[in-house]
Amino acid sequence: MIFCFLSVFTNAQTIKGIVVSAESGKPVERASVFLDNTTIATESDSEGNFQINIPANNKNQLVVSAFGYEYFIVSDPTKTTNLKIQLKTEDTLLEELIIDKNVFTRKQMLKAFKHFFIGNTKNAKRTKILNEDVLVFYYDTKTNQFSAYSDKPIIINNENLGYTINFHLDTFQVQFNYQTLDPKNYVNSFYLGYSQFIETSKSKDKIIKNREETYKNSSAAFFKNLMLNNLESEDFILAVNGLKVDPLEYFKIDKALDFSTICVIQKPVRKTPVVDKKAFVNGVIDPNKITHYTETEVPFTILNMKTKEQSIMYFQQECTQVSTSGQLLKPTDVLFGGFFGDLKTADMLPFDFTVAMPEIKTNNAETTKEMPTYEVFEKEAIDFYTSKDYISYVKARKNFSDKLNIKYNDKVHEPFALWIDKNLKNTMFTSKEEAISLHDHFVSTYKAIKNQQKDIEKKEDHFRKVYGEKKFDEMYSKAILGGIISKAEFQKPE
């Protein structure tokens, strides 16, 4: 697929305001005013005035920052067009901070900070902090917690992605197992802040390719394809306990114009059998005697089949919101481990950067030639869904699934003949032979209608794009259902 990069907002809203000192009421000059995690930014003038254009569909915070003052955050700047920002003087925390003597050198702590803040990926190798001197480090020998502070934005130059990032660090903490800075011996790491992206390279093929690759391997790409129910086509697999699962069994997704809400409807768990004396028969455990299980919540596993990278994902909230490009509006809602957990600042992309697949052109001459008119398609669909082959397939599928009684997926389980040997007792089949016979009949009837079904589904997708999902579903379901009933009535024996 060809990906294109879009950073153009429509229906922009102009926000005006003034930045003053909360103590003196005097204007604050050259205060940074920016939408968090975007390239949209400006500065206040000598009178403290500023003007910034933001997209009407914006979900990002407006951040106002000036040296010597605390950050001022406007959570929803679209609610007003005139702002008066009163900045409070910042506490002198850094001047009072006492660093334990000679525990680690500054060089050692800077190296550890870069590992947990910049990362260790291909992008990280070409990413530099340009003002390392603003960083202050602290290692608590009692808790083995490593922290970093800065009263000025950390200026980061990312050559691979063509951005300079002004990162306003709010929190940085790494918890180690013992007194060490070795990345192999940490318990968890955590940092938060506000980021302003500045384009340093435009229209360079190499930069565009790097951004595309970075996005395609990110958690944002996973969430975007999860929203589109498109994981497999982009080679993402969602698994629980090592087995591939259907995302729709675990997530409910509500799509809106500017963002989507993803809710966990079923927690991933591992079931452990409770073995008691009743489960033993002649000194041997009888699986059929085990009736109770304990459930332990486990993380979701995400596997990228192209890169072979594996990530784990914990939802901290029942629901979270993601942008149209798949970025989390509240990053703390989901915790990552594995590959996604190792992606740090060097692999960040701004929110106003999106990757979109090109729209399918329905007026293309070749496409039009392949597709019939909607009226002809309706008749084809009715004929297919009332055909003897399709009815035989439906009956065979029902007979097999009714007796199967438990989940079997040929994409993740071993061949059915081997699988049934281990699971026959948990099904309603009377014998292995019956199970294999019904399975083979189900498979053979599916093969008989497989190509026709794919053709009908392809045409359904085409007309769904032409008419819109809601309108198509209404008229199609009505016509198809009515046609099937009419044909069934016509074919009734007298």
Image (cartoon, helix red, strand yellow):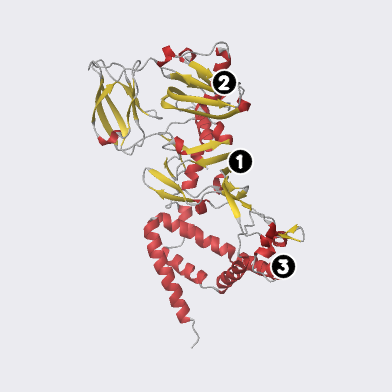
Foreground pick, 438 / 169: 169
Task: Residue under label 3, please give it.
Answer: 432
Q: CA distance from mark 2 to mark 1?
A: 30 Å
Are the residues flagged by discs 2 and 1 in contact, CB closer than 8 Å?
no
Q: Provide the secondary structure element on which disc 1 rests.
A: loop
Residue underneath mark 2: 112
**Which quadrant would residue 439 be assigned to in this image?**
bottom right
Q: How many marks?
A: 3
Residue 171 appears at what percent x and percent y?
45, 25
Q: Position of residue 94 (x, y in %)?
A: 43, 14
Look at 58% across and 66% down and name the residue there: 449
Which residue in the structure is indicated by mark 1? 306
Above or below, 61 relative to 465: above
Q: Amino acid at mark 2?
A: Ala
Q: Are marks 3 and 2 in contact (CB under 8 Å)?
A: no
24 sits left or right of 452 in the view: left
Q: Is residue 292 above or below residue 68?
A: below
